[in-house]
Amino acid sequence: MNEIASDPEMGATPVVASALPAEELERLTADIIAALKTVYDPEIPADIYELGLVYKIDIDDDRLVTIDMTLTAPGCPVAGEMPGWVENAVGAVRGIHGVQVNMVFDPPWTPDRMSEEAQVATNWY
């Protein structure tokens, strides 16, 4: 698997060697992040990537993507729908052969995970 850092402050950087050509891995990484930025929490005016809800993205050598993500709260009203939104958005990326979204709640999400952009959008600064 090719794990990608999902901290918006750090940027997305492949951290594991891959059988995929570097250019393709870079394009997939950028396109996956762009796709994640199209998915918004309906109650917060920021996308899930900038909110820090995406904990991990793995791209395997067969171009299957596994995403570990969370919600702002376990009882979030869109908990049942959000994984499908993420799967649809990332699944539309050219070259991706499948997407699995895992909902995780450890560690719990906190506003400290938000990027500066999300903090400004939510007046959390």
Image (spheres, rainbow, N blue to C red):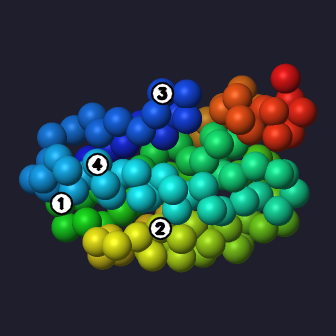
Tell me which numbered mark, 2 or 4, is placed earlier along the sequence.
4
At a point 44% along the width and 58% down the height, the residue shown is 32
Of the residues tagged 1 and 4, which is closer to the observer?
Answer: 4
Whole-angstrom CA distance, mark 1 to mark 3, is: 24 Å
- Please determine whether, in this image, residue 120 is positioned above or below residue 65: above
Q: Under tag 1, what secondary structure?
A: loop
- Please determine whether, in this image, residue 112 is positioned above or below residue 15: above
Classed neighbour count for the residue bearing mark 1: other residues with Cα under 10 Å, few (<14), some (14–19), many (≥20)? some
Q: Is residue 114 left or right of residue 73?
A: left
Q: Which quadrant would the C terminus be assigned to in this image? A: top right
Q: Do the residues bearing badges 1 and 4 touch, measured as CB atoms within 8 Å?
A: no
Residue, disc 1: 61
Whole-angstrom CA distance, mark 2 to mark 3, is: 21 Å
Label annotation for residue 26: 4
Residue 17 x/y as whole percent: 15, 40
Residue, disc 2: 90
**Outermost residue, top side:** 125
